[in-house]
Image (cartoon, coloured by chain):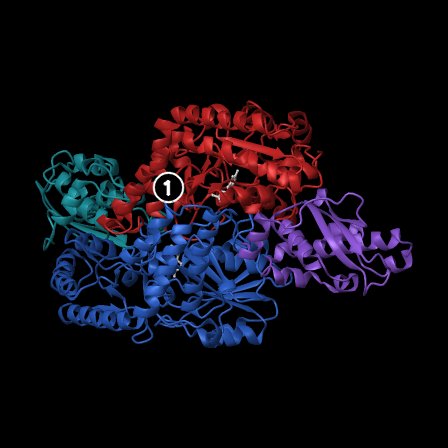
Chain colours: A blue, B red, C cyan, D purple
Amino acid sequence: MIYLDYNATTPTDPRVLDAMLPYFQARFANPSSIHRAGHEARRAVEKAREKLAHLVVARVDEVYFTSGGTEADNIAVKGVAFAQNKRKKIITSAIEHHAVLTTCEYMTKFGFEVVKVPVDPHGIIDLNFLEDAVDDNTVIISIMHANNEVGTVEPITEISKIAHRHGIVFHTDAVQTVGKLPIDIESMGIDMLSLSGHKFCGPKGTGALIARTGIRFDPLSHGGHHEHNKRAGTENVPGIVGLGKACEIAMTEMAEEEKRIRLLRDKLWNGIREKIPDLILNGHPEKRLANTLGICVRYVEGESLLLHLDMHGICASSGSACTSGSLEPSHVLLAMGIPHETAHGSIRFSLGRYTEEAEILEVIRVFPKIVEKLRVISPLSKK
Amino acid sequence: MIYLDYNATTPTDPRVLDAMLPYFQARFANPSSIHRAGHEARRAVEKAREKLAHLVVARVDEVYFTSGGTEADNIAVKGVAFAQNKRKKIITSAIEHHAVLTTCEYMTKFGFEVVKVPVDPHGIIDLNFLEDAVDDNTVIISIMHANNEVGTVEPITEISKIAHRHGIVFHTDAVQTVGKLPIDIESMGIDMLSLSGHKFCGPKGTGALIARTGIRFDPLSHGGHHEHNKRAGTENVPGIVGLGKACEIAMTEMAEEEKRIRLLRDKLWNGIREKIPDLILNGHPEKRLANTLGICVRYVEGESLLLHLDMHGICASSGSACTSGSLEPSHVLLAMGIPHETAHGSIRFSLGRYTEEAEILEVIRVFPKIVEKLRVISPLSKK
Amino acid sequence: MQYSQKVMEHFLNPRNVGEIEDADGVGTCGNPICGDLMTFYINIEPKTDDLHMARIVDIRFKTFGCGAAIAVASMASEMAGGKTLFEVTELTRQDVADALDGLPPVKMHCSNLGVQAIQEAIKDYLQKIGRPDLAKTIQGCPKKSEHNNQ
Amino acid sequence: MQYSQKVMEHFLNPRNVGEIEDADGVGTCGNPICGDLMTFYINIEPKTDDLHMARIVDIRFKTFGCGAAIAVASMASEMAGGKTLFEVTELTRQDVADALDGLPPVKMHCSNLGVQAIQEAIKDYLQKIGRPDLAKTIQGCPKKSEHNNQ
Ligand SMILES: Cc1ncc(COP(=O)(O)O)c(C=O)c1O
Ligand SMILES: Cc1ncc(COP(=O)(O)O)c(C=O)c1O
């Protein structure tokens, strides 16, 4: 299997799994228990918290473990909105992941207004629009660090400056960047940040919300006194330990890995566009995740591309995994101004830790044939 | 280590861990992905869903995977309350876990009224009070199946009848009973049920909400189209597979295990009360979880008992693990009418799958000495 | 969502792909904006207006669309080929879906598209041979707005 | 929340446990309703009202309470034993906590209890020797209501 769907999920790094294993059986206790077994579990959780904090340059008490990126996004948007009752506007972007978009839309039920900042054809948000949209009624700005479908990296520092000029909390969904790009919440001006373990070779079912000291938010899940009373529920100790290990690995290997993957990604792009006419590169040509290659293949439809690839043992995706099966083309591509017809032909290759050059060469060999085959049967191809 | 804190958490059964392992690496894909690797993950998730459904006699599409019991409780109470806007009263009991209690209390922020049904000295809820409290303004009744601190099992069928006579949704927190007691949501009249994997030798960070077809509830976390649009977030595939395996094991071994554990639990109780005067058994003498022995040791304080036990390698708990470290005695014991002074001396032994007779004998040997030692230094002991 | 083996087989090896120059009838359904478009080309013998006599003797298609759309077009072309026009108008989307061993619910609209596009081609033929009245009795594609709502 | 080794050591082997019959002073702080109660018994030599002269020559306690409460009582008894009454009134809860290598924040109130109960015993002594005025200058336990709010 050639797996080029790392933006959907990643395998768990064997070092991560090894770190987790003792916490299923030998050290299985509840970190809230006051016997020594409990203390041992507590120490493991707090050690993982340090590693997380280290990776994004946060304080340890600014880290709140969650069950994933979606939960972190929900806590941020709902939590900040519900923790006050003066401001009633939520600003987000048109290209957010559904975990933010749908969450914002849900808040209209509680009287919040949602403004979606548009993006340019490369997927960069319109800072002027944002500047005009913010006001004293705005409670939170939630704009993603990098987009999962096209990889475009947003101008976080500029966004945070606009937010802070108006006393607005700035949250960023960094699910696709944590572990791939260096992050420093202080210097980037990030008040809240969401991350997800399974996107950088950590375990599924793990994630975190980083919230700067002083940011007020209601919990999403209420209950016991876990995570400074902000996220109730018995801690997923093995998962948290694994997430910590994934952060530790990313910390030391991220820079090297980014370089290696970027080369492979560019080789893939150059290899296929040499052989296939009428390809469109999605996202920003430079300000883009090094691992992401989103393209639109004109005259054909994305799912049929995927199925053919799959028959060749190649795993890719058309847009975000969550919305496959929907009939609408990606809201991200549409927001970037790509016509429906073209957007239906989108496909995303996303590379990762275990991607090898031979795999890329195989895709370069196979993919053009698939496109050719589908174009032959397409009524849209010009002959 | 002698671990008698199974109500706080359990070790993961080795068979459960074995079932999980392939899904970290070999079969790591995202179940929403439309390549074959994704389908394989999807099948694993759906197979686990069948096992869960089987254990509580539900339909597979009535199972919603969550990150644990707390999340399931939150979805139920908040979800049902927010999915409508006519009814404004939430009824619960005075002895719920914080995952339900705190959640209900939070809802007062949104204009809901919370009524807590009192319990008798054995911890059985007052059905007459409940009958009087329900009205057309009540949206949900959330009363636990069995209490985590004292083990008392509530009259679920009677409660559900009262709920349904008034068209009210009935939710039960069955975190302490799933995998320990047979459950049939249909015949028990349960509309919604919360369960948690790590309480019956499944993995931490897993759980589920069971919601009967037709029960309307808002999601707690919004985002992708996971779990029939009711619980967004990439599925924790290894966790879900492990939870499924834990259900499968419980299904076949529960009855035998219950018998074995009850004998050991009764041996423990008889062994210590023979040697220690002034012990009070918490909870109902018969309608009680077979694994739970909650007692109050008069004239001494619970934490100091725990610490001494811990020095002998014995893990127990005083009340729920989540609230240890709080200065208030257990709200459960207080609701049962136990005086503060006595409630401070509570300790809970909870047995489980790996508890052996030799361990029970060791506790019977050690515990009386500890009580004796602490009573000698207590100003409350009568000499 | 996962396809049957039959769907995959037709998707990977679609039958009757192509165009017919100067076809007796041509019909198109779908809309690339919605992600699928099918054009069917048919030749008829004998070229009568008796729906019970006239048969599809050659059938070709081109499709832009998902795996289901391609498989449906292929299967529909196989089912319609050799049949009288009357028999073809009796084909339902369920017939096509069944012949493919089922389709995922979210893809059922595709099976409609196949039958409808062939019916459009039949309408086109009837119009060409001067029987617009007969053509009107045959269903063909729904109006655009309806299709968009599917 | 985890205790220091020092706390555990005093908790497991508390010094000066017991009662003194006909003690020169007896003081109790805390409330079993709140989960901790300490009673200190002290003997004083010389039995003067000069706080700088009178020394605690024997000290015993009984405690109902958590691990911290027991360790605090034990440590406080060690720190007060042999000291003049004046020196004892200068002891703070921080002194006791420090001597125990710290206490978890949620348990800091226990350290107060130790010092206060010994002060109560001193007040009792001063009252018994006819110096209620002097007794009033010494702090002792807070009023019940205050303690409950801690
Ligand atoms: C009765 C009860 N409800 C809910 C919970 C919360 O479950 P979890 O820790 O899986 O969130 C627990 C245990 O902590 C419990 O005992
Ligand atoms: C940008 C972005 N945000 C949020 C999420 C949701 O994260 P999770 O699946 O961990 O809930 C994802 C991936 O699914 C994502 O790519």
The chain under label 1 reads B
Percent position of residue B256, x then y? 38, 24
Residue C123 placement: quadrant: top left
Residue A109 visible, this angle:
yes
* Residues packed near mark 1 inside 10 Å, few (<14), some (14 to 19) or many (20 plus): many
Using the image, determine if residue A210 lies above or below residue B166: below
Q: Between residue A35 and residue B287, name the one nearer to us.
A: A35
Using the image, determine if residue B316 lies above or below residue A342: above
The amino acid type, in three-letter code, at marker 1 is Thr
Quadrant where the image shows the C terminus of chain D:
bottom right
- Give the residue at mark 1: B12
Using the image, determine if residue D130 lies above or below residue B336: below
Q: Residue at x 69, y 32 (%)?
A: B337
> Would you say A334 lies left or right of B112 here?
left
Circle 1: element type? loop
Quadrant where the image shows the N terminus of chain D:
bottom right
Percent position of residue D106, x then y? 62, 55
Q: Between residue D11 and residue C47, name the one nearer to us.
A: D11
Q: Residue at x 39, y 30 (%)?
A: B55
Residue D141 visible, this angle:
no
Percent position of residue B326, x then y? 61, 49
Quarter for ligand 2?
Answer: bottom left
